[in-house]
Image: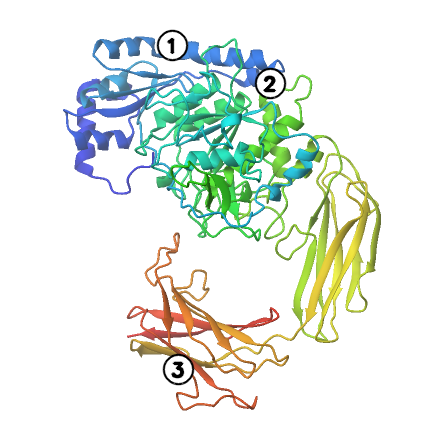
């Protein structure tokens, strides 16, 4: 776990002296983590320290990872890991038991977990073969689910393209997913039929329970997560991505919200061999982890225990999926272990396909991704719906059994379910190892994701939104036409030019890419559906054949001549069904509104007393559109995270301010990593007519003064402010940026 940012030197020195006294020769002792020293000093000699003792010896799994006899290779891998742990740890475990301690063997990582008095730490560190003594740190559970009553279906599952695979008969049948969470309500009608059942499908390290249940601490978090992987349609709509898959679960968080590194390691050990019988292969295909080390925000926590277990589980051919975290929108907010090179982290998008404000962003604090398909690593790897998605919840929480939830916790199971679907549709190749099969499916999923945001992979959307039909085509050597358009949402085959002033010209381009696994033949590109001269295809560098991975561009020009809307389409005929494919184009002839003219405080003014009155003028829109204005105030000139936002400042065509506005207070002493919505206030405006300015504005020559007064600013601070004006057809303009300094 991450060290505390504040160290108490005296305490650490005292613990170091204790270690030296107990171990004899410090030069021969293994490293002891700072956290262990701190815990020793905090509890005193009469307490107990939970530690993980890691041994240096490691099994070389490289050869096993390449073997095509997958079941036998996994059996030998698990057998080898267990044998190695017994040989390395046996004498120390025996010593600890003789002294009344109860060590737990963590054979998956060749370590043991034990709670010992401080006097034994030196013995552990000095034991032959021990590589390190680390604190068995606590892991905090995800934030409890905030539930709302579901409204209309959000289409979150459909957004992944599941229907195409479902219609082809692939629903996840024959695959098993594991939920590592707060538990699962096995009685829920959407989940009861898909629990694998038996004595090898539920692991509870806290109680002797024999069937899955979900504690109330996290408001049914584990049930909600599991339902997005495998949920059925008991409520009338299929809520899981792979409803034909089975599920098992490990309760890694107690009902009191407690977990630790050793509990998580034990849960992964259980998942690799749930029935503790190496002759049966009952491990899951996918493990979903909607949790992270929340105190690792923006750091790469080099927890060797977690790192090693993820590597070993992946070597066994099991997909390990993590939620990206809910610490956006600030950059560099990744968390471990999702940001490990081996981590498959999933961010969140909303119903409009825009990245969720809460979704954690990259760049990743760790580097060297195992997917190695990009010049620079990105975080998250991919995105999926995570806003207001319909989930199953225990009926003692919501009697209906359903809720609407948001968070990357609910994005991750979309991807876990998607991998289960692909495993049911795409079989391993002859002689393909379990590890290579796992990696091939994950790379196929990532390489075919629908690009969102800026062109190419980025640190908000990763590689984009999971596109299951594209992934299936790539993995089964079929062509697949992927279309990117630069106007949001970028995967809807729709170029929207928005408002362009008559007499002006704007050009945008569709990107056509073959993300499939074989050649894509472009038979025809027909632009007769574009109404000339306003809309026209002016660029086409597409050849008749796009090899796998190749792309081309179709450039469209919009040159409106009047204040009217225009729409049309381009038809692309190819050997990828359905064909032809319609690419839609829209735009509106519309002049931009005039920018607001700032009046006061004058630019650069100092010693401005609080409260501050800001004033500006807004001219009329040439098109006669109704205008609205937004006032931004920030202590940074880039307005990345504005302190104050006054939205919905309404103005008539003549520019007169006609309504009060809501203020969103986001500072001014804000944490830029976590923008906190503090309050929503209604403020009265000083309209020009009331303040001695212009009247109702029957003449467009009268330009009234608009103003707003606020006390929500700090003294002795420089602020920047601007006004954004929007017309009713989407035209946007901004004023100049002025500054003032408060007294």
**Image x and y of residue 438, in percent:** 59, 26
Q: Residue furthest front?
A: 399
In the structure shown, which secondary structural element does the residue marked by tag 1 occupy? Answer: helix
Viewer-proximal residue among 147 and 724:
147
Name the side, left or right, on which 490 lies relative to 221. right
Secondary structure found at label 3: loop
Question: Height in image: 562 above or below 45?
Answer: below
Q: Residue at x 37, y 56 (%)?
A: 676
Q: Quadrant of the C terminus?
A: bottom left
> Label 2 crowding class (10 Å Cα cut-off): few <14, some 14-19, many 20+?
some
Residue 343: tell me if it is visible.
no
Q: Verify CB contact (< 8 Å) between mark 2 and mark 3.
A: no
Please state, as top left, top right, bottom left or bottom right, where the N terminus lies in the image: top left
Query: Could you say where residue 644 lies in the image, as x and y percent from the top left?
Result: 39, 66
Q: Position of residue 38 (x, y in %)?
A: 22, 33
The label on residue 686 is 3
The CA distance from mark 1 to mark 3 is: 79 Å
Between disc 2 and disc 3, the foreground one is 3
User: Quarter of the image holding residue 555?
Assistant: bottom right
- Residue 66, numbered label: 2
Point out the tag, 1 or 2, that comes first from the N-terminus: 2
Please give the name of the residue rendered at 65% of the width and 56% of the height, measured from the top-left corner. 486
- The answer to whether residue 256 is above or below residue 692 is above
Q: Secondary structure at mark 2?
A: loop
> According to the image, label 1 marks what residue?
86
**Quick one: 700 or 632, which is closer to the camera?**
700
Cβ atoms under marks 1 and 3 closer than 8 Å:
no
Cα distance, mark 1 to mark 2? 25 Å
The x, y position of residue 366, in whole percent, is 46, 38
Q: Earlier in the sequence, mark 2 or mark 3?
A: 2
């Amino acid at each position: 776990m991450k060290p505390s940012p504040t160290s108490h030197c005296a305490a650490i020195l005292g613990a170091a002296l204790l270690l030296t006294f107990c171990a004899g020769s410090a030069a021969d002792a293994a490293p002891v983590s700072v956290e262990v020293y701190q815990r020793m000093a905090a509890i005193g000699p009469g307490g107990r320290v939970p530690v993980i003792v890691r041994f240096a010896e490691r099994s070389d799994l490289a050869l096993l990872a390449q073997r095509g006899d997958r079941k036998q290779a996994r059996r030998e891998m698990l057998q080898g890991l267990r044998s190695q742990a017994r040989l390395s740890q046996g004498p120390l475990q025996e010593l600890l038991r003789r002294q009344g301690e109860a060590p737990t063997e963590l054979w998956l990582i060749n370590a043991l977990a034990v709670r010992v008095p401080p006097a034994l730490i030196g013995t552990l560190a000095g034991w032959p073969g021990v590589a390190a003594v680390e604190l068995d740190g606590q892991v905090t559970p995800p934030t409890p689910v905030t539930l709302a009553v579901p409204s209309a279906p959000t289409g979150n599952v459909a957004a992944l393209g599941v229907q195409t695979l479902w219609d082809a008969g692939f629903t996840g049948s024959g695959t098993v997913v594991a939920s590592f969470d707060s538990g699962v309500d096995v009685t829920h009608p959407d989940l009861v039929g898909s629990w694998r059942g038996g004595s090898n499908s539920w692991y509870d390290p806290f109680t002797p329970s024999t069937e899955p249940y979900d504690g109330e601490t996290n408001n049914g978090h584990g049930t909600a997560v599991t339902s997005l992987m495998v949920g059925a349609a008991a409520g009338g709509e299929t809520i899981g991505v792979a409803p034909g898959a089975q599920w098992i679960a490990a309760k890694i968080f107690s009902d009191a919200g407690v977990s630790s590194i050793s509990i998580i390691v034990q849960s992964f050990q259980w998942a690799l061999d749930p029935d503790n019988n190496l002759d049966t292969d009952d491990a899951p295909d996918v493990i979903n982890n909607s949790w992270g080390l929340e105190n690792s925000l923006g750091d790469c926590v080099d927890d060797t225990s977690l790192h090693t277990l993820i590597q070993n589980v992946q070597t066994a051919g099991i997909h390990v999926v993590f939620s990206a975290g809910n610490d956006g929108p600030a950059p560099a907010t990744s968390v471990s272990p999702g940001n490990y090179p081996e981590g498959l982290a999933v961010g969140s998008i909303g119903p409009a396909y825009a990245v969720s404000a809460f979704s954690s962003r990259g760049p990743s604090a760790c580097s060297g991704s195992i997917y190695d398909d990009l010049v620079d690593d990105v975080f998250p790897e991919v995105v999926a719906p995570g806003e207001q998605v319909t989930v199953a919840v225990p009926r003692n929480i919501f009697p209906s059994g359903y809720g609407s939830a948001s968070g990357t916790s609910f994005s991750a199971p979309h991807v876990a379910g998607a991998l289960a679907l692909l495993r049911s549709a795409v079989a391993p190749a002859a002689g393909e190892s379990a590890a290579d099969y796992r990696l091939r499916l994950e790379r196929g999923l990532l390489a075919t994701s629908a690009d969102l945001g800026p062109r190419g992979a980025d640190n908000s959307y990763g590689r984009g939104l999971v596109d299951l039909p594209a992934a299936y085509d790539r993995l089964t050597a079929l062509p697949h036409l992927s279309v990117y358009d630069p106007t949001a949402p970028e995967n809807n085959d729709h170029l929207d030019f928005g408002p362009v002033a008559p007499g002006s010209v704007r050009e945008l381009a569709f990107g056509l890419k073959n993300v499939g696994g074989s050649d894509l033949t472009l038979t025809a590109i027909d632009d007769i559906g574009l109404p000339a001269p306003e809309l026209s295809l002016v660029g086409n560098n597409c050849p008749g054949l796009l090899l796998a991975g190749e792309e081309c561009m179709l450039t469209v020009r919009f040159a409106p001549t009047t204040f009217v809307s225009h729409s049309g389409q381009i038809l692309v005929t190819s050997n990828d069904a359905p064909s032809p494919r319609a690419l839609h184009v829209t735009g509106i002839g519309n002049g931009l509104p005039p920018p607001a003219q700032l009046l006061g405080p004058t630019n650069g003014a100092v010693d401005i007393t609080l409260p501050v009155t800001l004033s500006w003028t807004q001219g009329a829109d040439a098109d006669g559109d109704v205008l609205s204005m937004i006032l931004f105030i920030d202590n940074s000139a880039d307005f990345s995270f504005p302190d104050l936002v006054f939205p919905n400042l309404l103005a008539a065509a003549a520019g007169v301010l006609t309504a009060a506005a809501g203020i969103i207070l986001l500072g001014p002493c804000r944490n830029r990593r976590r923008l906190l919505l503090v309050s929503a206030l209604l403020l009265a405006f000083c309209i020009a007519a009331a303040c001695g300015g212009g009247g109702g504005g029957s003449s467009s020559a009268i330009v009234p003064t608009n103003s707003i007064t606020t006390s929500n600013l700090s003294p002795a601070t420089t602020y920047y402010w601007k006004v954004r004006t929007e017309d009713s057809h989407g035209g946007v303009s901004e004023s100049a940026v002025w500054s003032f300094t408060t007294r």
